[in-house]
């Protein structure tokens, strides 16, 4: 398709979008509560618009690592502390025992 790249750039300019490649990216890490996904030697592009940015990550090699200790949100921990009156550390332990299930963690702490 001849001139496709130029036409794409013109269309993006009309829409108020600016797209740039981010150079020298060594890795991208995506973190969830249960695991991390590590993408090595990715190609990363950023598309800037008036409302924010969109990042596109392209990579062939990636590795998934399961987290030994799940990460719980501060909101979840605070809710357990408020509902049961326990300290933060005990709330985190209960969430771990309950595998992140808020209701079960509260029941574990209130049944004792």
Image (spheres, helix red, strand yellow):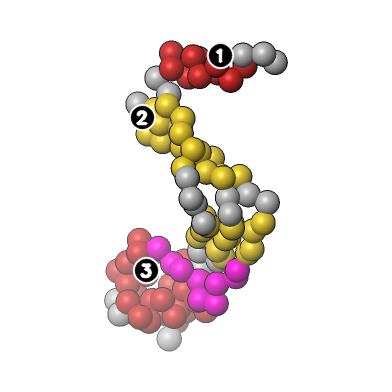
Q: Earlier in the sequence, mark 3 or mark 2?
A: 2
Find residue 51 and name its label. 2
Q: CA distance from mark 1 to mark 3?
A: 51 Å
Pointer 3: what residue? 77
Q: Position of residue 45 (x, y in %)?
A: 50, 38
Mark 2: secondary structure: loop
Location of the N terminus by quadrant is top right
Note whether residue 66 is visible.
yes
Crowding at mark 3 (Cα within 10 Å: few <14, some 14-19, many 20+):
many
Front in this rendered view, residue 12 or 76: 12
Q: Is residue 82 left or right of residue 29?
A: left
Mark sitting earlier along the chain (2/1): 1
Is 36 drawn above or below residue 69 in the view shown?
Answer: above
Residue at position x 48%, y 50% in the image = 24
Q: CA distance from mark 2 to mark 1?
A: 23 Å
At a point 61% along the width and 45% down the height, the residue shown is 58
Mark 1 is surrounded, within 10 Å at the Cα level, by few (under 14), some (14 to 19) or many (20 or more) other residues, namely few
> Which secondary structure dominates the residues rendered in magenta?
loop
- 28 falls in the magenta region: no
The residue lying at 52 percent from left, 56 percent from top is 26
Region in magenta: 65-73
Task: Give the vertical position of 107 relative to 75 (above or below).
Answer: below
Determine whether, in the image, residue 6 is placed left or right of residue 47: right
Which of the two residues, 91 or 43, is positioned nearer the viewer here? 43
Residue 50 lies, in percent from the top left, at 35, 26
In the picture, the disc for residue 7 is 1
């Amino acid at each position: 398709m001849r001139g496709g790249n130029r036409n794409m750039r013109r269309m993006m300019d009309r829409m108020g979008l600016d797209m740039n490649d981010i150079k020298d990216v060594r890795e991208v890490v995506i973190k969830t509560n249960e695991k991390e996904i590590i993408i090595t030697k990715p190609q990363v592009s950023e598309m800037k618009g008036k409302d924010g940015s969109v990042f596109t990550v392209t990579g062939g090699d990636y590795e998934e690592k399961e987290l030994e200790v799940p990460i719980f949100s501060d909101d979840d921990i605070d809710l357990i502390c408020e509902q049961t009156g326990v300290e933060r550390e005990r709330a985190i332990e209960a969430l771990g025992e309950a595998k992140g299930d808020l209701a079960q963690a509260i029941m574990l702490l209130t049944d004792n």
